[in-house]
């Protein structure tokens, strides 16, 4: 298990229908070095982004994924916001909401 607080303890789930937070963390973990500016965008990162996009099939899944990603954005040390925000587009994935610490995950459909 990672000692990075952004990956160690995402918000608790209360709805069994939510995308499991451990799965969201698994999908985003390969992107962390790129998001910190410590490595290039990798095929593993893009695979995770695409996998999460496919896995988030319902509104509750997308909201859960958003909350977990938001938690990562807030807690990840040395995050380079520009790098992190651009990852989905560079991987060919279009998401209809911004990635930021201030996005409200609950209006997301």
Image (cartoon, rainbow, N blue to C red):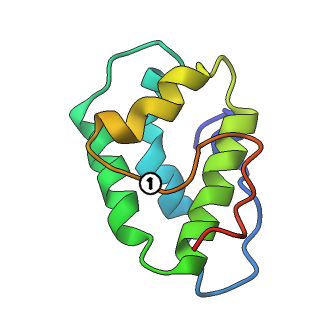
Within 10 Å of disc 1 (Cα), the crowding (few <14, some 14-19, many 20+) is few
Locate residue 35 relative to residue 70 in the image: left or right: left
> Residue 83, relative to residue 30: is it above or below?
above
Residue toward you, 94 or 15: 94
> Residue 68, relative to residue 46: is it above or below?
below
Give the residue at x 22% y 35%. 43
Residue denoted by label 1? 95
Locate residue 93 relative to residue 64 in the image: left or right: left
Residue 19 shows up from this direction: no
Farthest residue in the top direction? 38
User: SS for tag 1?
Assistant: loop
Is the C terminus in the top left, top right, bottom left or bottom right quadrant? bottom right
Residue 68 shows up from this direction: yes
Horizontal and vertical percent position of residue 36: 54, 19
Farthest residue in the left direction? 43
Locate residue 54 relative to residue 7 in the image: left or right: left
Is the N terminus in the top left, top right, bottom left or bottom right quadrant? top right
Horizontal and vertical percent position of residue 103: 72, 50
Horizontal and vertical percent position of residue 101: 74, 40
* Quadrant hosting residue 74: top right
Residue toward you, 51 or 29: 51
Give the residue at x 77% y 44%. 102
Give the residue at x 54% y 22%. 82
Number of callouts: 1
Give the residue at x 32% y 59%. 51
* Quadrant hosting residue 68: bottom right
Locate residue 55 relative to residue 21 in the image: left or right: left
> Residue 83, relative to residue 52: is it above or below?
above
* Quadrant hosting residue 81: top right
């Amino acid at each position: 298990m990672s000692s990075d607080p952004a990956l160690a303890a995402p918000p608790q789930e209360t709805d069994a229908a939510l995308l499991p937070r451990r799965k969201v963390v698994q999908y985003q973990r390969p992107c962390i070095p790129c998001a910190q500016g410590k490595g290039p965008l990798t095929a593993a990162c893009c695979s995770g982004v695409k996998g999460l996009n496919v896995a988030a099939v319902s509104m509750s899944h997308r909201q859960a994924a958003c909350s977990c990603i938001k938690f990562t954005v807030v807690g990840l040390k040395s995050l380079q916001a520009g790098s992190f925000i651009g990852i989905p587009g560079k991987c060919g994935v279009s998401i209809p909401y911004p990635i930021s610490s201030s996005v409200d995950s609950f209006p997301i459909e």
